[in-house]
Image (tube, rainbow, N blue to C red):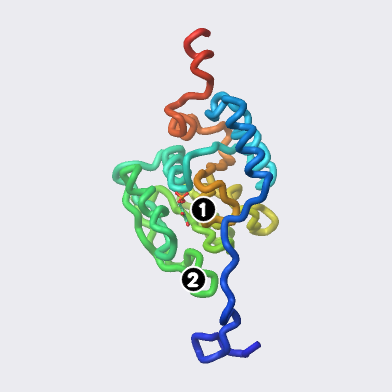
Amino acid sequence: MSDRPAILGGAPVRAGKSWPSWPQSDGTERRRLQAVLDSGAWSSAQGEEVERFVAEFIEFQGARHGIAVTNGTHALEAALTACEVGSGDEVIVPALTFVATATSVMSVGATPVLVDVDPASCCIDPAALGEAITDRTRAVIAVHLAGRACDMDALTSLCADRGIALIEDCAHSPGTRWRGRRTGTIGEAGGFSFQQSKLMTAGEGGMVTTELGATPTSAVSGTAPGITTSSTARTCG
Ligand SMILES: Cc1ncc(COP(=O)(O)O)c(C=O)c1O
C-alpha cells in the first residue's frame, strides 16, 4: 500500500474494485415482512413489530425511552418540539452535515445558526460553538458525523452552563460510544435515521431517544396524530 493518499499521487486502494451493494438482505427480511402482511396488523398501533423494535433498539443504545417516527428528519423535529424550541429561537448546528439537521430547525419555526466543524473529527467545533451562543440560543444539534462521536464533554458543559438543550443527531451513529455511553443518551434527546444509506436501514424510518423523565407527549402526538390504540379500541371503548 502507498504511504500517500490517492488524491496526493498515491496508488488508489480501490482501483478496479466496485463498492459492495447496500442495503443487503437475505430471507429473514422477506420472512418477517410476509408475516406482517399475513397478520393483517399493518399499523404500529395494531401490530407488535414496531413496539418490539423500539424496545430492542433502546436496550442496545442504553436509552431510557424511544419513539419510532417516519424518518430521521422527523426525529429531529420531534426532539426540538419536545425541548420547546420554536419561533424566535436560535439553534446551533454544524456546517458539515446533511441538510435535514438545519431544515428540521426551520420546520419548528426557529433559526439555524451554522458553525464550523473541527477538521480533525468533522464534528462541531466546541470553540466555534461557544462563540456563536447568543441570548436567543435555545438548543444545539450535535451531529455524530460518519459514526464519530462529538466531544460530548465540551458540548455538555457549554450547554448545561447556559440552560441550552443539547440534541444529538445520531443518523450516522447507532452503536457509537462516547466514554462508554452510546450516542443519543447523553443530551436531552437523540434522533436516528433508518433511511436506505444508513448503517442500520429499513429503507425509511427514524427514532427519537430521550433521557427526559417521561416520554415527551409532544413527540408521540407528532408520530401518528396522537394515535396510540387501534381504531376499534378508540371507537368501541
Ligand atoms: C446527519 C443526518 N441527519 C439527518 C438525516 C435525516 O434522516 P432521514 O433521511 O431519515 O430524514 C440524515 C440522512 O438522511 C443525516 O445524514
Q: Is residue 158 visible?
A: yes
Q: Nearer the viewer, mark 2 or mark 1?
A: 1
Q: CA distance from mark 2 to mark 1?
A: 27 Å
Q: Crowding at label 2, few (<14), some or many (≥20) Cα neighbours within 10 Å? A: some
Q: Which residue is mark 2?
A: 118
* Label 1 residue near ligand 1, CB within 8 Å: no
Q: Nearer the viewer, residue 29 or 235?
A: 29
Q: Crowding at label 1, few (<14), some or many (≥20) Cα neighbours within 10 Å? A: some
Residue beneath the point at 49% across and 85% down = 7
The mark nearer the N terminus, 2 or 1, is 2
- In percent of width and height, residue 172 lies at 55, 57
Look at the image and tell me in which quarter the N terminus lies.
bottom right
* Label 2 residue near ligand 1, CB within 8 Å: no
Q: Which residue is mark 1?
A: 196
Q: Nearer the viewer, residue 143 or 16?
A: 16
Picture disc at residue 86: none
Callout 2: SS: loop
- In percent of width and height, residue 174 lies at 61, 53
Callout 1: SS: loop
- In percent of width and height, residue 188 lies at 53, 45
Q: Is residue 209 above or below residue 43?
A: below
Residue beneath the point at 48% across and 24% down = 227
